[in-house]
Image (cartoon, helix red, strand yellow):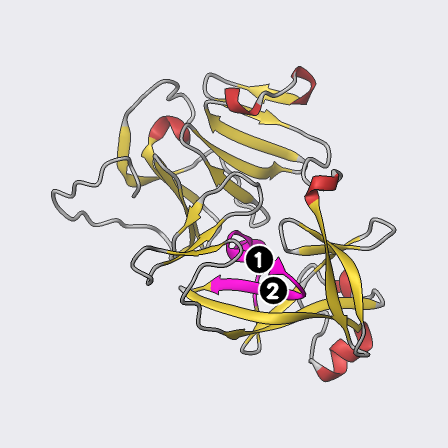
Amino acid sequence: MNVDNNEVKHWASVNLPDAIKWVVIGTNNTIFSLWNADLYGAGRMSNFMEGMAGSQECSLQPIKLEYFKPDRQIGIDIEKDYTEIYAYYTHTHLLVGNSAALELKEEEIRSFGPNWVQYKRENQHENTAAAFEEIEVHVHDGTKRKVNILKDYCHWVESNGEKHKILCFIDGFRLDLERSKNCIAIRHTKMFAKVDKTIFSGQLIMVPREKAAVEFNVNDDYDGDVQLLRKGRILIAFLEEIVSPYSFDDFNVSEDGESLIGWISYPERPVTMNF
């Protein structure tokens, strides 16, 4: 559970109302997201429970976050002293725990309590030069072009500022980059992903919408992609499994050469993700 204690005295059953979809593990607490979109927390309770300010009490059993309204379009970051939920409400972020590290301005705070704060930062991750990375990608006609990639590695940005999703497929299945962005990297025309402890890689290619629909069987049946697929161009990647016996970019190999570790790249504070 990552509760700052490696000692195991006995195994305990954990009963949850639905299967676990993804997990974010921090130094002192862990957050579980279920397939029904509910969130559960375990570990140091002051990091994810309201009204637990200053408490060192830990829970080894996952506790439902009753204050959270299920919404799949979120991101979570866990630090030593707090848990942060991005887009808790529209354009609002929620932090539970010690918020001093964020150095929030008074005008950014919407509401707060003893150990939590809701805050808003306009275009916090998108409208700064540091949020972009310019790379070259392949074009369907055999040429290359430069593209601005957001550092969440889920979107590319046109010269007019319009943001579009990057489409990614593994073995014919669409990879949800929003859920996998903690283990995604883009370097030198290629996209890398770690899925189920396996590294995948593939070239990024810019293709017309019509070509993607006909040749790659990409359509607008995916929720949220209708606007993207009406545009003239799509940035797409088809990933294949690769062998990675050494560290590269944001992907590290442990000292024994076996365990693959993906480091979060958005936000930029590093968090180890285990799958």
Q: Are marks 2 and 1 in contact (CB under 8 Å)?
A: yes
- Residue at the spot 16% in from the left edge and 48% down from the top edge: 11
Query: Looking at the picture, how far across and down is residue 29, in whole percent?
Result: 36, 37
Query: Looking at the picture, how far across and down is residue 15, in whole percent?
Result: 28, 50
Does 260 sit above or below residue 67? below
The image quarter containing residue 50 is: top left
- Residue at the spot 73% in from the left edge and 56% down from the top edge: 156
- Amino acid type at circle 2 is Met
The quarter of the image holding the C terminus is: bottom left
The image quarter containing residue 173 is: bottom right
Q: Secondary structure at mark 2?
A: strand
Does 252 sit above or below residue 114? below
Q: Which residue is mark 1?
A: 185
CA gap, disc 2 and disc 1: 6 Å
- Residue at the spot 72% in from the left edge and 69% down from the top edge: 220
The image quarter containing residue 148 is: bottom right
Q: Which mark is residue 191?
A: 2
Q: Which residues are magenta?
A: 175-194
- Amino acid type at circle 1 is Ala
